[in-house]
Amino acid sequence: MGPSKPSILSAALLSRATIVVFTVCFHSFADNYDTSSELDADCLHTHSNLRQKLWLKSGTSPVTGPLDRYITWDAVHFVRIAKCGYEFEQSFAFFPALPLVMRTLSTTFLWPLSGLLGERGTLWLSGLLLSNCAFVASAVFLHRLGLATLRDEELAYRAALLYCWNPASIFYSSVYTESLFALASFAGMLYLVQRRRALSLLLLAASTSVRSNGILHAYFFVFEAAATASEHWKEALEALSRKKEPEAPAYTRTSSALVYALFAVLRGVVWSALVCTPFALFQAYGYQQVCVKGDQRQPWCSNTIPYIYGYVQDRYWNVGFLRYFRLQQLPNFLLASPMIALSVAAVVSYALHDPARFFLLHLWPTYTREPPGKAIASSEDKAGAPGDPGTKRDRSTSKMSGSQLLTKRNGGGVESSQPFAEALSALGDWQRPVGPEAGFFSPDVLCFTHQLAIMVCVATLIMHVQVATRFLSASPVVYWYAAGLCRDRKQARNHSKEISRGRKGLPKEFGSIYRWIWGTFIGYSVIGTLLFTNFYPFT
């Protein structure tokens, strides 16, 4: 990364300032399509009113009216919840972390402005500042996550730069949960990669209190538990396959390995449950408010598992499996197609790079991270000198992928293959060198790619598909993959004399991909701001 490049912090600040300026300008050029959001009804319960409970300054001013025009779409619900609490059943579609922080800021740091802006305006301003500050911090954490995971400084920088102008930019600068969720998610992922599990667990659990899809972060601990358990399981198999065991009897080593494997599984289950705990507590709170304290008992209260979030999404938003697969929803599918296509391409590219690694999940031997040059040298040293009887076997083993190393050799040299691994070999040439890989195809990217695959399925099959643009924008894999495509263009330009097939010696496919990615990101940022700001449908 050259010294002339701006820092990610500067790029994030510039992008947020640009989006905010565009928002103000677009508001002045056009009127809101729907002005009902400007209505400010009193809270149903007097004790919920912040003005009476927390002595906020009240009053009207020339600023109050214009500010109400900026409270659009979901911001109406978040401001209302922050002001009055969860008054209505449908309000439980919105999680409590953002309204809670907005309420705290408006009654502490921004309290002096309540007389000028009014109660509603102060809550909106607190949410706006929170979202933009959280976005800047999330961009910094994404950059650090890329450095730790990809071990490629340029790729990590480019990915964070793309994130600063992601297609859902307007939502990251509005009173929405995207920025706060991205901050908790990227920070939690970073600390997970750095093996700071307690802090990672806390942040990933916090993300679940911001958005419902935070429960997908539980997969990281499931993945880690399965990987650890598989290592111990392989140790147990090795102990059983050995005829002589000088250190300890085979059954002792096998028992110890199985105990450690069981412990890893139990730990993964517990940590995954802790990630989902805020989600469960919110459902319990909804049951208490609606079914116990409510005036009218709803049908879902009698279910075996009273699940208010699912009921609200089903009844009020018509969210469900394949419900959006209608001909009249084709424009929404087209609107979401760029982000879905980029996400699918990222998953497929990673899977085809090493199908054994992707489909066998975590079943490959671990290794100590070393610089590539050192790792190659050490592997050559271990291979032995020419003429050594073990040289051929070791060198062939060093070219195997992790899953191919599941094929174990016993003392007599007879191989016992895994049938699943043999079946996957039909997918193509999936032999990869064993050792540290940098870049998008690093083994550390695997669990994040799996999560993205799950997110794509949820976005296309269950959710309102137009929401996929901002739903998938919370995955770092999207930016890592897109950054890799953009860097390929630069590499092609450096070799333009050898591969001159397009304008300025640049292969046409590289230039097209580069322009498509940045054109989509910038175009969605600008057009989305125009539509969203004036209460026109976007995503």
Image: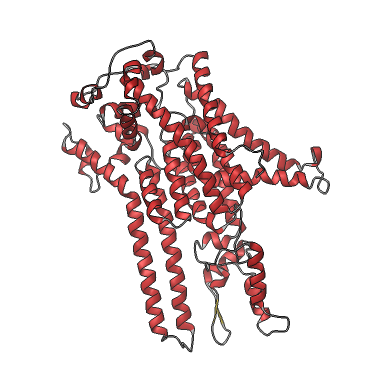
Toward the viewer: 193 or 483?
193
Total numbered labels placed on residues in the image: 0
Q: Position of residue 64 (x, y in %)?
A: 36, 15
Toward the viewer: 278 or 34?
278
Tell me: residue 41, above or below residue 264: above
Residue 126 sits in quarter: top left
Q: Residue at x 60, y 44 (%)?
A: 157
Tell me: residue 529, above or below residue 116: below
Left or right: residue 380 compared with residue 305? right
Residue 104 sits in quarter: top left
Tell me: residue 266, above or below residue 23: below
Tell me: residue 150, above or below residue 333: below
Visible residue check, residue 464: no
Q: Position of residue 425 (x, y in %)?
A: 60, 66
Residue 116 sits in quarter: top left
Q: Position of residue 223 (x, y in %)?
A: 44, 59
Left or right: residue 370 compared with residue 448? right
Visible residue check, residue 177: yes
Q: Coloured how?
A: secondary structure
Q: Residue at x 81, y 41 (%)?
A: 505
Quadrant location of the N terminus in the rendered image: top right
Toward the viewer: 457 or 160?
160
**Residue furthest to the top:** 62
Q: Position of residue 455 (x, y in %)?
A: 47, 46
